[in-house]
Image: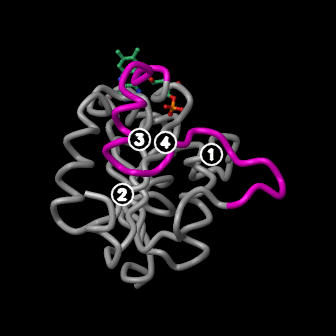
Amino acid sequence: MSGMLSSARTLYLFASAAPPVLDVAGVVENARRDGWDVCLGLTPTAARWLETELEHLETLTEHPVRSEYKLPGEPDAWPPADAVLFAPATFNSLTSWALGITSSFVVGVAAEAIGKNIPTVAVPCVNAAYARRVGWSADLRQRALPVGPHSES
Ligand SMILES: Cc1cc2nc3c(=O)[nH]c(=O)nc-3n(C[C@H](O)[C@H](O)[C@H](O)COP(=O)(O)O)c2cc1C
């Protein structure tokens, strides 16, 4: 398996703590089958939900699964991203992203990806009660739903 993806494009697959994250291994497998080298990032809560699977996910992706920022001076653990997919994206992660609150590693990297013009897509997983919060649709329009160099108009 190793080396098979050496010419692949790199996908940063980010996921937060909503139930679809429990199927993230299947998403990784599908993306790899489609030719992506997948680097998996999780919010700390999602990492806790997947605690028993983390080792398997590292074997599957052939990269460390990350949920914390590196230390200053530490080398990058992943190759640079060609695309970012944030799925599922919780209400917490999306509104943090929209507000620029980047204490979560994956939210910070997703926010930076937009600044670097890396194609970035978020797939919200939010119930109706959350979505009725004042400002939610404006948050999404401004920041978080398919964003990147091809959706600027
Ligand atoms: C069983 C369960 C299901 C949840 N489902 C959702 C969901 O679908 N969408 C959502 O925004 N939050 C959901 N939450 C709440 C988030 O897990 C919670 O807000 C958490 O702080 C999100 O953190 P994160 O965005 O850093 O992963 C759920 C929580 C639990 C325990």
Question: Which element carries disc 2, helix, strand or loop?
Answer: strand
- The answer to which of marks 1 and 2 sits earlier in the sequence is 2
C-alpha separation, residue under disc 1 versus residue under disc 3: 17 Å
Check if mark 2's residue and mark 3's residue have beta carbons within 8 Å. no
In the rendered structure, which amino acid carries the disc numbered 4? Val
**Pointer 1 or 3: first along the chain:** 3
**Dividing the picture into quarters, in which one does residue 55 lie?**
top left
- Write down the residue under mark 4: 65
Q: Secondary structure at mark 3?
A: helix
The answer to if 69 sits in the magenta stretch is yes
Q: Which numbered disc covers residue 38?
A: 2
Region in magenta: 48-75
Image position of 141 (left or right of 104): left
- How packed is label 2: few (under 14 Cα within 10 Å), some, or many (20 or more)? many
Relative image position of residue 74 (x, y in whole percent) = 76, 55
- Mark 2 or 3 closer to N-term? 2
Which is more N-terminal, label 4 or label 2?
A: 2
Q: CA distance from mark 2 to mark 3?
A: 10 Å
Contact? badges 1 and 4 (CB < 8 Å): no
Left or right: 147 with respect to 20?
A: right
Instruction: State how far apart marks 1 and 4 are (Cα).
Output: 12 Å
**Disc 4 vs disc 3: which is toward the camera?**
3
Rendered location of residue 4, percent (x, y): 26, 67
Residue at (17, 53) in percent of width and height: 30
